Image (spheres, rainbow, N blue to C red):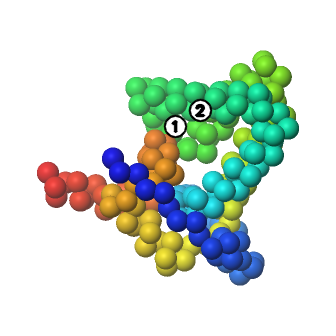
Amino acid sequence: MDVTIAPLRAWDDFFPGSDRFARPDFRDISKWNNRVVSNLLYYQTNYLVVAAMMISVVGFLSPFNMILGGTVVVLVFTGFVWAAHNKDVLRRLKKQYPTTFVMVVMLASYFLISMFGGVMVFVFGITFPLLLMFIHASLRLRNLKNKLENKIEGIGLKKTPMGIVLDALEQQEENMSKFTDYISKVKD
């Protein structure tokens, strides 16, 4: 699998004035999910830079706890994804309620990390960057270039790190999921 790194988007595109941000429609979960997935894919490198800055600051202040926290979260996430592939109940939870699934992973990580005393590092170094990404992805309106890039990724012409994580969570734009199912049937 050829993984490509998405380009860093212009910062004035990533965080422009309030005219490009709007509250999502909480009644239409599917549309909100599409917005979040689309923005996570499109701005993934910007999110990585912001998270890396925050992780660097926290890691500088407490390097052992940051490495421990990151390792625990990755292992717990991998374990939950593996379990979800093998248990239908977890698979449905992951597919239908991805936010709940991620919160369960984070809570399990929190309890494991609390045994080692690194809770504040976990909160500020891991949870806070994820929360900022989710808030930005929820509020940022999509533009035409954003939608086009996501279609290319969804068809399979391009694979990025965020696309791999979202595939593990079984999250795609709803229309794209239907389109890729159709393409795979045509190939067969």
Residue that mark 1 sits on: 93
Image depth: mark 2 or mark 1 in front: 2
Residue at disc 2, secondary structure: helix
Residue that mark 2 sits on: 74
Task: Mark 1: give few (<14), some (14-19) or many (20+) Cα within 10 Å.
Answer: some
Asked where in the image residue 176 lies, by quadrant, the reply is bottom left
**Type of residue at label 2?**
Val
Is residue 31 rendered to the left or right of residue 125? left
**Type of residue at label 1?**
Leu
- In this rendered view, identify the residue nearer to me: 136 or 62: 62
Q: Position of residue 137 (x, y in %)?
A: 63, 61
- Among all residues in the image, which is located at the extreme top? 115
Q: Earlier in the sequence, mark 2 or mark 1?
A: 2
Residue at image location 77% in from the left, 29% down from the top: 65
Is residue 32 rendered to the left or right of residue 89? right
Asked where in the image residue 113 lies, by quadrant, the reply is top right
Asked where in the image residue 10 lies, by quadrant, the reply is bottom right
- Residue 181, relative to residue 21: is it above or below? above
Q: Position of residue 174 (x, y in %)?
A: 43, 59
